Image (tube, rainbow, N blue to C red):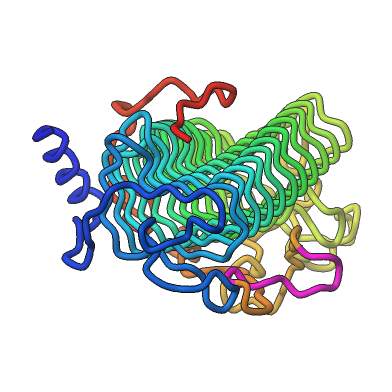
């Protein structure tokens, strides 16, 4: 036990997670089954369970060594789990488990050294907001078989497999999180529909920054992905938009697209990756208006159907740092030689049989702050013409095109993020020593 305590102290120092605050009150694990079980004896500190006066579970410090810290099942009442600390679940017990619930928020908690930090299973209208989750044996945050969920503003580090995992779920928003130093993947989406992944820092993960398997209607926008094996990986997915992400120093590839369809990759920056954008067996793929700068191999496309690396004339293609052509002419055939038009006069060879017909001579201005262009950013979670719901449910919300986390400009000489820990200075760590056997889904080790 002393060794475990020392490890927890060391981890807290590493990732900036506070120890138990003096305001926390130690108590036994909490189990609530059914709305009638929201009682003071079960850790409820206030509220009546209505939308305007939710039940509150707050201020507890819970040792999860022998049971999941807080378990809520089969409820519909509105509830908030706030400012709690749960630790010590190790391989078996979770920090918080929401099982077949609706209308529950988990916010401002600290979850260290549990099997899963926070789990929402078969639930709806749940929010997981502004928590700190570290050293989870399996996954930091798991949303499984759920709908209408929000995962926002969490700091998830040193997960044994995935930092944030959305599995077999729909209508989910994953926004403004840090998901770094995971032993496998920062943010993972599998068998999902209508998901927005926006404003996250998924850096320094051993394998993937963001991974999609069998996903549809996914928007990936304004994320920072640094120092991963692969920054963004798509497999057998469709209707995917990857826009205005900043991806750098990927050890293998910035973006990999395999057996996927209706994929648009535009307005992104790919900087100093070993490989840029690579596609195999893709259908209806468009790669345009991106900046490719100083990647060892800029890109490639094989066995594709209706793939395009430009948007035609005069919209143009991509900026390539190794393009050696000149701009003296204009026109669809670049044969009207009365002056330049910002597009290279000769195509750029992406690979031996793939070209960008209209390479841009400069980084697209509309990618950066101060631009007057406003590319449409669809919300997959609202019907056409309807305003997006705010993440806290209080009104309309529209994400900015660029957040403060992604306006680093290598092409203007500004300082790049630190090599270790990603662009926001999150703690560096070697996740290799934390690798576990992958979660097989059908036999998840979890205490219900």
Image height of 43 relative to 54, above or below: above
What secondary structure predominates along the stretch shown in magenta?
loop
Near-viewer residue (54 or 37): 37
Near-viewer residue (437 or 345): 437
Question: Magenta span has 386?
Answer: yes
Near-viewer residue (131 or 403): 131
- Residue 336 in percent (x, y) is at 89, 61
- Residue 382 in percent (x, y) is at 78, 65
Residue at image location 33% in from the left, 33% down from the top: 431
Residue at image location 32% in from the left, 56% down from the top: 425
Judge left or right: residue 48 versus residue 70. Answer: right
Quadrant housing the N terminus? top left
Magenta residues span 382-392
Image height of 220 relative to 255, above or below: below
Visible in this render: residue 416? Answer: no
Near-viewer residue (90 or 46): 46
Visible in this render: residue 101? Answer: yes
């Amino acid at each position: 036990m002393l060794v475990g305590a020392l490890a927890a102290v060391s981890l807290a120092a590493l990732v900036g997670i506070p120890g138990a605050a003096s305001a926390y009150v130690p108590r036994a694990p909490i189990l609530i089954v059914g709305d009638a079980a929201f009682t003071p004896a079960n850790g409820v500190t206030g509220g009546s369970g209505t939308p305007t006066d939710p039940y509150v579970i707050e201020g507890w410090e819970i040792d999860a060594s022998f049971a999941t810290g807080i378990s809520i099942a089969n409820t519909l009442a509105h509830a908030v789990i706030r400012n709690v600390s749960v630790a010590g679940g190790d391989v078996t017990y979770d920090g918080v488990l929401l099982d077949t619930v609706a209308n529950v928020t988990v916010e401002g908690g600290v979850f260290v050294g549990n099997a899963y930090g926070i789990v929402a299973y078969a639930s709806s209208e749940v929010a997981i907001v502004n928590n700190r989750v570290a050293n989870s044996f399996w996954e930091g945050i798991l949303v499984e078989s759920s709908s209408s969920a929000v995962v926002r503003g969490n700091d998830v580090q040193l997960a044994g497999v995935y930092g944030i995992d959305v599995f077999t779920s729909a209508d989910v928003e994953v926004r403004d999180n840090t998901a770094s130093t995971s032993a496998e993947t920062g943010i993972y989406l599998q068998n999902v529909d209508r998901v927005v992944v926006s404003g996250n820092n998924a850096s320094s993960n051993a394998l993937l920054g963001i991974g999609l398997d069998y996903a549809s209607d996914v928007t990936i926008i304004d994320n920072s992905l640094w120092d991963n094996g692969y920054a963004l990986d798509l497999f057998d997915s469709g209707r995917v938009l990857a826009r205005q992400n900043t991806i750098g120093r990927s050890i293998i590839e910035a973006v990999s697209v395999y057996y996927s369809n209706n994929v648009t990759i535009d307005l992104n920056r790919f900087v100093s990756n070993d490989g840029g954008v690579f596609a195999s067996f893709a259908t209806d793929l468009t790669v345009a208006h991106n900046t490719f700068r100083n990647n060892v191999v800029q890109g490639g496309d094989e066995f594709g159907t209706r793939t395009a690396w430009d948007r035609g004339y005069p919209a143009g293609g991509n900026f390539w740092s190794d393009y050696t052509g000149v701009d003296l002419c204009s026109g669809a055939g670049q044969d009207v030689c009365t002056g330049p038009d910002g597009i290279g006069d000769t195509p750029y060879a992406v690979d031996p049989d793939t070209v960008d017909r209209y390479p841009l001579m400069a980084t697209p201005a509309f990618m950066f702050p101060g631009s007057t262009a406003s590319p449409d950013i669809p919300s997959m979670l609202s019907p056409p013409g309807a305003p997006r719901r705010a993440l806290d449910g209080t009104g309309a919300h529209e994400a900015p095109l660029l957040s403060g986390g992604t306006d680093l400009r290598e092409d203007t000489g500004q300082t790049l993020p630190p090599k270790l820990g990603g662009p926001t200075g999150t703690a560096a760590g070697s996740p290799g020593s934390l690798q576990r056997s992958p979660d097989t889904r059908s036999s998840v080790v979890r205490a219900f």
